[in-house]
Every structure is written in structure tokens, then in C-alpha cells.
Image (tube, rainbow, N blue to C red):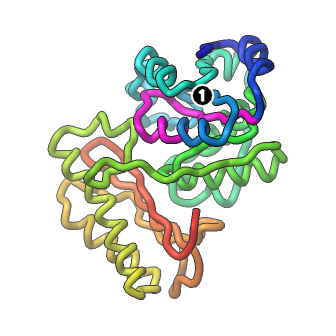
Amino acid sequence: MQTVTTIEELRQARQHLPAPLGLVPTMGYLHEGHLSLVRAAKRACAAVAVSIFVNPTQFGPQEDLDRYPRDLPRDLALLEAEGVDLVWTPTPQIMYPEGYQTWVTVEHIAAPLEGAMRPGHFRGVATVVAKLFNAVQPDRAYFGQKDAQQALVIRRLVADLNFPLQVVVCPTVREADGLALSSRNVYLKPQERQAATVLYRALTAAQAAYQAGERNADQLRQVMQSVLQQEPLARPQYVSCAKLDDLQEWQGEVSGAALLSLAVFIGQTRLIDNVVVGGEF
């Protein structure tokens, strides 16, 4: 496994990798969710590259950039064990040198949900992902469904800017009790960790209602709200039943694929999760 930092080193190493090349973009502090993406890339690609970069431009001023968990030696050991070919670990100065002023903005699909709660977040995501794609030149790029809106934004980015690559979205990886794996789970205190299972319980309750024939969008949202209200440590930020293609909220009858999603504070830790009903991601 080769580890590089500069764009010049990356491009030189990239020349020697066979096609197709799969890219797994990460912010590090890797867990089984990230490694599942690496394995999916390994199955489909001749070579696999992973980027590790905690992207400052997707964090808001009151968010957790400074305390976001980092452990590069551990990450590199995990990736080497998975047989990754190339790891790129750029610095903020490499990605955003002095005088940097070019940004990528995806509009409508980035506006609701996470976009509404975290202004500027998807501008940072879209910009860094465009830079990653341009530098690495992958044939396929792998993302997890846990960050569903991010995956949809990136699909739109790739289509609109004609990047010659396939975006592959892989299923959310969960703990045995349903909690979606996230680097931020490390922030949870023991009591909060137990409370955090309420997100998946709320989603599966709404999913079960849908499967039992419930099609009223407000009722599906209410099912999620009712479960969340049973957990004293949960402070919901949004509860959504949105159209999967454009993330506009379903009104009245759900007549197509829907993304059931929520963002919830458990203590000081903000967690997100989702499931899809009536279609495939």
C-alpha cells in the first residue's frame, strides 16, 4: 500500500494503478462502515484508493471540526489489512491553498434537511468531492447510504458536471442493536449510547407502518415522532418523509419511493439515519 500526501505524488502513483479504479472518500477514524465500502470497491475494481481528509469547509462555525476524531496510524493499518492500493492524505493547505476562491454549489437537492440545518455544508462537500474526483480520476466512487442526502447530492454533481465515473451507494452498516455506525458515535456516553438506538427504532416503526399499508406522509412522520418522544435524551432536529428523487416532502399520499430520515441530538452529539420505503436507493 502506498500512502501519498501531495497532488503531485498522487498523480504519479495513480498512473501505475490498473483500471477500473475505485475510490472511497473518507474523513478518517475508520469503522466497519468505511471498510464495507472498501470491500465493495475491492470486489468490483482492479485497484482501490482511499482518501482521508477532514474537510474543514463542510463544518459550520459551531460544529465539531476541532474535536472530530482522528487516528491516522490506526486508519492506515486497517486499510493495509484490507489490501488497499493507494491512500491519499492531503492537508487543508493542499486542498485550499492561500487565495482559494472556487466553490461548487448543488442547488435544490442540497437545500432541505441537512442543507437547511447546516448552511454551507453541502457547498463544502460538493467542492471537496469534485476536487477528489478531479485529482484521483476514479472509475467508481463509493459512499454509504447513512449519509443519504450527501450521496444524492454527489450523484447530481457527477451527472451535472459530466464526471466519467459511477457513484456506488452501499447499505448502511449497523451495530447489533441497529445504531448506524458513525465516527461521531465515539462521543456518546454509555447512557447516551443506549438512548441512540431510538433513531433506528423510530425509522423501523415507520417502515413497519408503511409495509402494513400506511401511505399518509404525516402519519409516517408522526410514527417516528411518537417513538422519539419516548426517549428523554433525544432532541429531534428534523423528521422527514421525502421524495427520494428530489427530497421534497411528501404531502398527503406517498405514491412513490420515500426517504424516511431524521436528525436527532443525543446529549451534545448529533446523529442522522434513514431508511427507504417504496423503492431502492
- The relative height of residue 100 versus residue 150 in the rendered view (above or below) is above
Q: Which residue is mark 1?
A: 50
Query: Is residue 160 toward the left or the right of residue 268 in the image?
Result: right
- The relative height of residue 200 versus residue 162 in the rendered view (above or below) is below
User: Residue type at mark 1?
Assistant: Val
Residue 85 drawn at (x, y percent): 62, 22
Q: Looking at the image, which residue is at 59% across and 16% down?
A: 1
| Along the line of sight, the residue nearer the viewer: 210 or 238 | 210
Residue 161 drawn at (x, y percent): 82, 46
Tally of marks: 1
Q: Looking at the image, which residue is at 45% across and 18% down?
A: 77
Query: Is residue 232 toward the left or the right of residue 179 in the image?
Result: left
Q: Looking at the image, which residue is at 77% across and 32% down?
A: 19
Q: Secondary structure at mark 1?
A: strand
Are there few (<14), some (14-19), or many (20+) residues within 10 Å of tag 1?
A: many
Query: Is residue 188 toward the left or the right of residue 38 in the image?
Result: left
Say if residue 120 shows up in the picture. Answer: no
| Along the line of sight, the residue nearer the viewer: 38 or 114 | 38
Residue 185 drawn at (x, y percent): 32, 39
Q: Quadrant of residue 263?
A: bottom left
Q: Looking at the image, which residue is at 51% across and 36% down?
A: 59
- The relative height of residue 183 versus residue 82 in the rendered view (above or below) is below
Say if residue 41 shows up in the picture. Answer: yes
| Region in magenta | 20-37
- The relative height of residue 173 versus residue 278 in the rendered view (above or below) is above
Placement of the C terminus among the 4 image quadrants: bottom right
